[in-house]
Amino acid sequence: MPTKDEFIKAVQNGYTFKGESVKIGAGILAGETIAEAGVYLPLKTLNRHGLIAGATGTGKTKTLQVISEFLSDASVPVLVMDIKGDLSGIAAIGSVNEKVTSRYQLLNMEYKPAQFPAELLTISGQKGVRLRATVSEFGPVLLSKILELNDTQGGVVAMIFKYCDDNKLPILNLKDFIKVLQFFGDEGKAEIEKTYGKISTTSTGTILRKVIELQQQGADTFFGEKSFEVDDLMRIDDKGHGMINILRVTNLQDKPKLFSTFMLQMLAELYASCPEEGDLDKPKLVIFIDEAHLIFQEASSALRQQIETIIKLIRSKGIGIFFCTQNPMDVPASVLAQLGLKVQHALRAFTAADRKVIKQTAENYPETNFYKTEDLITQLGIGEALITMLNEKGIPTPLVQTMLCAPRSRMDVLTDNEIESITGKSKLVAKYNQVIDSESAYEILTAKLNEAAEKSEQQNSTANTKEEPSTFEKIADNTVVKSMMRTAGSTIVRSLLGALGLGGRSRGSKAKSTKWF
């Protein structure tokens, strides 16, 4: 049985780092919290991503809140996805109570209530800074992945973007894209096929249905102007605190595809716009994705693959991503392998399937002589977690049962008045919440088609318009007059022929003999 001194020594050796670090809790051995066995979080390695897992009610969201607070103190900006609506309290000062005080005493730390600089964001029309992106910024490849198109349909989307680039037709929102798609299948089909090749009406119809499906989840509020600049996620306030950007997506369960679309676009934009940084002393931005299973379960295989690829590459940009979910198995194995920090809260074993998952989860953590991991996972208390991470050399630290700090900000939601106060003072709300409707593909094509329709009507009107006939033409064209003229004409002709001796004989009459003397 390992001794207390051996445990303290192992934790201190494993969680002492050269660069800047923050204490997030203390180790627990045999049910006793040992303040000397401090568990520290090295800022230098937070771009190596992380996982916060555990059953409902075990303290995952509060752990996320605590780490966000320490990052803000260290001048690191944060973006958190507030799925349940209980993270907005970061913007309000916390309150002292007996439970919080006793926890900090166990950790040999002082509790100082604080509030942190926060910005409220939204992608679905809630109060806060409106996050938008144009369809053009997605490009044909990314848009095809979001719409789950095959190669043929993706080729049509690429053709649409090429045609719009060549003809200076900006595609800003889904209304623009739908208009161009309809133009491809109808009025402009002959013109486009002559230059770009044949287009299948089946393909355009399928693409249109996919776009409408995306619209049904509220994508019209996301696509458009003014596009959000990712640099605005990396702000530091006047006191040197990193800004905590809270994306309020409480209605996400009804719009999983919209959230996946936003996440993919944002990660792609961050990767494309941020320079290569390597390993910095601390990350430029850390993103926490609560209820991360909603991304992976609802995303197509192509979309998941794209997310996985970006996560593997974006660490070199100085950006860390943390997934918060109930079960580590919710995250694909290829992504799980990229996560350096693992914070495992309690899991519940109600069924045989649950016990199997717990066994698999325990096998993913480093071996330890201090605990029987498989059993301990089901026995962790609220605010306790098993922790391991990568040190500066990329070596996993010892697995430690940890009593975590409590948040210093409010552990509850903001009131409507508090939300109004924050958004009312926000410079970003003034920057991004104005309604902009620039002239784009929809307006340009509509005007072009209206002009063509007017020209066609004028030509048809000219062709059908005749000169007013004269009085003589009107009389001559009368059927009775025509009959009379034919009769009169026949009589005159016969009279002339008769005078010339060329008149014919009437049928049935006998010819008279003529004798010349």
Image: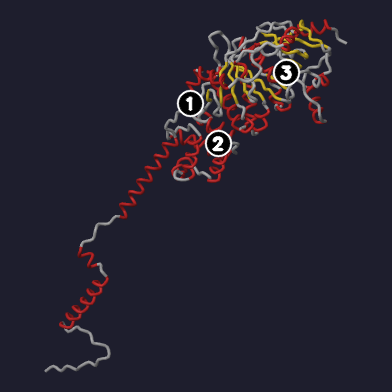
Few, some or many residues within 10 Å of mark 3 (<14, 14–19, 20+): many
Front residue (pair 427, 276) = 427
Mark 2 = which residue?
A: 215
| Residue 145, quarter of the rendered image | top right
Few, some or many residues within 10 Å of mark 2 (<14, 14–19, 20+): some
Front residue (pair 376, 275) = 376
Instruction: Let me know if residue 280 appears in the view.
Output: no
**319 shown above or below 160:** above
The percent position of residue 333, horizontal first and vertical second, equals: 72, 26
Q: Are marks 1 and 2 in contact (CB under 8 Å)?
A: no
Amino acid type, label 1: Lys
| Real-space CA distance between mark 1 and mark 2, rounded to the nearest whole angstrom | 19 Å
At 58% across and 35% down in the image, what residue appears? 217
Mark 3 = which residue?
A: 343
Residue found at the far right of this picture: 1
Mark 3 lies on a secondary structure that is strand
Where is the N terminus found, in terms of image quarters?
A: top right
| Residue 413, quarter of the rendered image | top right
The percent position of residue 117, horizontal first and vertical second, equals: 57, 14
Mark 1 = which residue?
A: 226
At 77% across and 5% down in the image, what residue appears? 36
| Real-space CA distance between mark 1 and mark 3, rounded to the nearest whole angstrom | 38 Å
Q: Are marks 3 and 2 in contact (CB under 8 Å)?
A: no
The percent position of residue 209, horizontal first and vertical second, equals: 56, 41
The percent position of residue 357, horizontal first and vertical second, equals: 79, 27
Amino acid type, label 3: Val
